[in-house]
Image (cartoon, grey):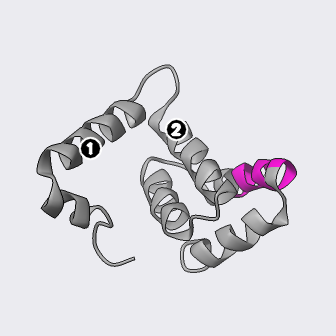
Amino acid sequence: MNGDPLNVIKEADLSFFEEINKNRDSAFKEGEITTKNKLLIALAIDAAHHAEDGIKSLAILALKAGATRNEILETLKIVNYICGVGSIYAAAGALKEIL
């Protein structure tokens, strides 16, 4: 993944891009669920959708937010149980340089 994948949206419609960023900031804001746990939830959703760039990006953010390697792997165990091994292959490809 090179640069922000939403740059194309930013260039085409700045106000929509800003709306997306506001939504993201609101979703990941510290609250009853910690930002770290929200990032792990998002990582699980991206893994379920086989979104490798998202998995990679969210894993990096989760680690920066204090998640451990084991917490990421535990998150993937849930994904494997609910969504199957295809999601784990996508996650493994995304995480090979991170974990």
For the C terminus, which image quadrant? bottom right
Q: Residue at coordinates 41% horizontally, 33% vertically from top-left?
A: 27
Q: Residues within 10 Å of mark 2 (few under 14, many from 20)?
A: some
Q: Going from the N terminus, do you reach mark 2 or mark 1 first?
A: 1
Residue wearing tag 1: 21
For residue 97, above or below residue 78: below
Q: Residue at coordinates 52% horizontally, 59% vertically from top-left?
A: 59
Q: CA distance from mark 2 to mark 1?
A: 16 Å
For residue 74, above or below residue 95: above
Please tell me whether mark 1 sits on a helix, a strand or a loop.
helix
Residue wearing tag 2: 38
- Where is residue 84, by image quadrant? bottom right
Q: Residue at coordinates 55% horizontally, 62% vertically from top-left?
A: 55
Q: Residue furthest top?
A: 32
Q: Position of residue 77 (x, y in %)?
A: 80, 53
Q: Which kind of residue does numbered mark 1 sit on?
A: Asn
In the image, taking residue 45 as reference, residue 36 lies left or right, namely: left
Q: What secondary structure predominates along the stretch shown in magenta? A: helix
Is 20 one of the magenta-colored residues? no
Q: Residue at coordinates 62% horizontally, 49% vertically from top-left?
A: 45
Q: Which stretch did the figure color magenta?
A: 73-82
Pointer 2 with pointer 1, Cβ within 8 A: no
Q: Which kind of residue does numbered mark 2 sit on?
A: Lys
Is 75 one of the magenta-colored residues? yes
